[in-house]
Structures are given as structure tokens and as C-alpha cells.
Amino acid sequence: MKAFIRQKGLVAPLDRANVDTDLIIPKQFLKSIKRTGFGPNLFDELRYLDEGYPGQDCSNRPINPDFVLNQPRYEGASVLLARKNFGCGSSREHAPWALEDFGFRVIIAPSFADIFFNNAFKNGLLLIQLDEATVDRLFDAVEHTPGYRLDVDLVEQKILMPEGEAIDFEVDAFRKYCLENGLDDIGLTLTDNSHAIREFETRHRASQPWLFRDA
């Protein structure tokens, strides 16, 4: 998992509430568990005018010119601005995989679905919950300012706006530690218990050597 310290990035606005995980990454793409390669199919039903399927070359598919991520002014965005209850629906970890693979590192919204919220942090995304009035102001700024960027500082827990204003945000201390150090669940386990794991493997190999004949 990539460490997260600070992200200065272009903001893309997704102005709709209750965006569920099936919209983020449709069900037909859940066959793969590689964690990578889902970016081209992020918001597949909104981005394209045809039906997508796994393994498809998306470069020649007909795109929906009205969808925000297909508009040239938002190309390369790494901060997604969304509305309330983002990530609702089924608990598919493919949703944060697709968002991260597309290039997003930060998602700002008034609220998030609980399971998506947990999955996103475990996959290197920083989710920031702000009040609706502040989110409205950000949507307005993005709409009226082409190339609008935010500087998100996880260490200081501040969003620095180009106008000079700083917005404070809250983040759980444990999640912050994991993001700053690039630790997912496996990395955290290896960091805290690597010595105990090595000792167990040594004892296991000694007590049951027939299991390791091909090792």
C-alpha cells in the first residue's frame, strides 16, 4: 500500500448522493481479485455508452461526454468531491481498488457508508468527512474555477484551499498511522508480529518436516 502524507491534486466533482458500490464498480468485474486493473471500469455504467465486461479494451468504447470524469478539465484528478452516503450498497473491496487504480487518493463528502469507509482506508484512500455547507462551497468553487486544486495535508489534518483558507478535518489516529506508513492489514501484521511469525515457522518446519519437502 502506498504511504499517504500529502496530496496536492485536481478536484473532480461527482454531484450525486447515495453513490453505491455497484455504481463505483459493477458486479461483472468482481471475478478478479488482483486488486489492480479496475481503474478503466470505475463508474463503468456512467462513463461508457455500452455495457462493459471483464478483460475488455476500454480505449475504443463509446464514452458518455456528459459524465464528469470524461470531461477534459478533470483529467488526472486525484481528489474526488462527492455527496452524502458515498459508497453505500454491498461491501465489495473492489470499489476502493477501482478508485485508487484510477488515480484518486482523497475523497471528500458529508458522509460515507461504514463498510466502504473501512475498506477505503485499508487500501490507501483518505476519506474526509465535512459538513454539507462546506462541501457545497467546494462544489461551487470547483464549478466556477477550472483547474481547481486542493492541498490535503494528512500530518496537519488540513485542507489548504487556493484562496488561502485552511479547513481542518478529523481522522482516526490509528487509520492516520497506517496511511502515513503505508500499512494495510498484512503490512501491519508483519510489522508487529514478524518475529513471532518467524519463530512459529521454524517450530512448524521442525515438528512437521514432511510438509516442506518441496520447499
Image (spheres, helix red, strand yellow):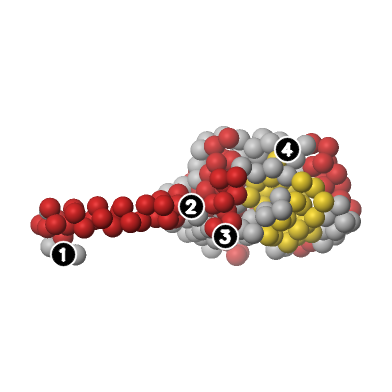
Element carrying mark 2 = loop
* Residue 55 in view: yes
**Mark 2 sits on what residue?**
184
> At label 2, which amino acid type do we have?
Asp
* Residue 19 in view: no
Q: Which mark is residue 110?
A: 4
Q: Which mark is residue 3?
A: 3
Q: Earlier in the sequence, mark 1 or mark 3?
A: 3
Crowd tier of the residue under label 3, counting other residues whose Cα lies within 10 Å: few below 14, some 14–19, many 20 or above: some
Relative to residue 55, is residue 92 depicted above or below? above
Residue 78 lies in quadrant: bottom right
- Give me the residue at 71% from left, 50% from top: 157
Q: Which mark is residue 36?
A: none
Marks 3/2: CA distance? 10 Å
> At label 3, which amino acid type do we have?
Ala
> At label 1, which amino acid type do we have?
Asp
Where's residue 94, x and y in %? 51, 48
Marks 4/3: CA distance? 24 Å
Marks 1/3: CA distance? 36 Å
Marks 2/1: CA distance? 30 Å
The answer to whether the residue labelled 4 contacts the one labelled 3, judged by CB atoms less than 8 Å apart, is no
Q: Earlier in the sequence, mark 4 or mark 3?
A: 3
